[in-house]
């Protein structure tokens, strides 16, 4: 059974703190993605990675960075959290086999106060 | 660029069929997906179809693809209260090295 896990379901941080969101997949997928989801705005892509040590900016990369040192792990970093980064963060992974099925983690609800 | 459009809301009575619609713009070979998101959870992949197919059935779910109109639908037979969720349509163009393009999601409400 496919599995994408995220380090926390709920997280509360203070403005200015550095925040790490971790995502791990066990499917040996090449591609990994970070999205944020806000009411009325749908899913917005922050960053993605096609391979270890590779990263590409998505639609809204400002205020975020990522790290992919191992194939199974993709980290999202908020260098200095701000209240407008309060959101639901979703990680996903996708293989390159037929179907290109993409699987999501359970999400992390981040609140920045 | 690619775009995926969905209506935002749908309300049906328990036991009826639900039909959720989606339109897309990419005309090349593509995979099209349906995801379900329950409150506070991640997205769950329900099913997908390749653009050379017209229909795919999986238990209560039927996906219909009209390539000429670039229209995709998800039919849920015998809709239950547990089907209440947001349903996302998404597409990817081959060779598959780009992110999925998602619609904004359709909120399905099932009335008992």
Image (tube, coloured by chain):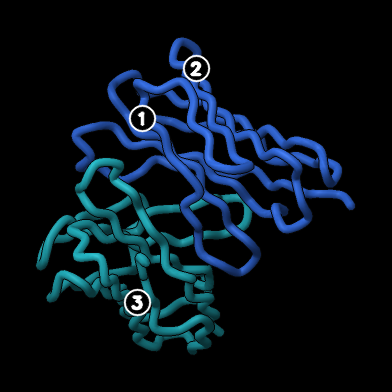
**B38 displayed left or right of B67:** right
Indicate the chain on which mark 3 is placed. A
Disc 3 + disc 2, Cβ < 8 Å: no
- The answer to whether mark 1 and mark 2 are in CB contact below 8 A is no
Give percent across and percent down for residue A76.
Answer: 31, 73
Mark identifier at residue B102:
none
Q: What element carries label 3?
A: strand
View extreme (top): residue: B68
The dot on residue B66 is 2
Chain A, hue in figure:
cyan
Residue A7 place in picture, x, y as percent: 39, 83
Checking the image for residue B50, the label placed there is 1
User: In the visual, does B47 lie left or right of A18?
Assistant: right
Q: Front-most of B55 and B69? A: B55
- Residue picked out by circle 3: A78
Residue found at x 75% / y 35%? B17
Tell me what hue chain B is rendered in.
Answer: blue
Q: How far apart are marks 3 and 2 (CA)?
A: 42 Å
Q: What is the chain letter for disc 1?
A: B
Residue drawn at x 55%, y 80% is A111
**Compared to B30, does A38 lie above or below?**
below
């Amino acid at each position: 059974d496919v599995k994408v896990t995220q380090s926390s379901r709920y997280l509360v941080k203070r403005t200015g703190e550095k925040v790490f969101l971790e995502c791990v997949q066990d499917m040996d997928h090449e591609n990994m993605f970070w999205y944020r989801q806000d009411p009325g705005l749908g899913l917005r892509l922050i960053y993605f990675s096609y391979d270890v040590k590779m990263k590409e900016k998505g639609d809204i990369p400002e205020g975020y960075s990522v790290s992919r040192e191992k194939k199974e792990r993709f980290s999202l970093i908020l260098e200095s959290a701000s209240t407008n980064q309060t959101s639901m963060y979703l990680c996903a992974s996708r293989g390159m086999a037929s179907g290109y099925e993409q699987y999501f983690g359970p999400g992390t609800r981040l609140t920045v106060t | 660029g690619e775009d995926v459009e969905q209506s935002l809301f749908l309300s049906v009575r328990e036991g009826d069929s639900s039909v959720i619609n989606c339109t897309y713009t990419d005309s090349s070979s593509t995979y099209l997906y349906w995801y379900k998101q329950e409150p506070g959870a991640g997205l769950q992949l329900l099913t997908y179809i390749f653009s050379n197919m017209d229909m795919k059935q999986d238990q209560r779910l039927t996906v219909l693809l009209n390539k000429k109109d670039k229209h995709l639908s998800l039919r849920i037979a015998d809709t239950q209260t547990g089907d209440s969720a947001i349903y996302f349509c998404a597409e990817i163009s081959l060779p598959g090295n780009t992110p999925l393009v998602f619609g904004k999601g359709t909120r399905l409400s099932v009335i008992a």
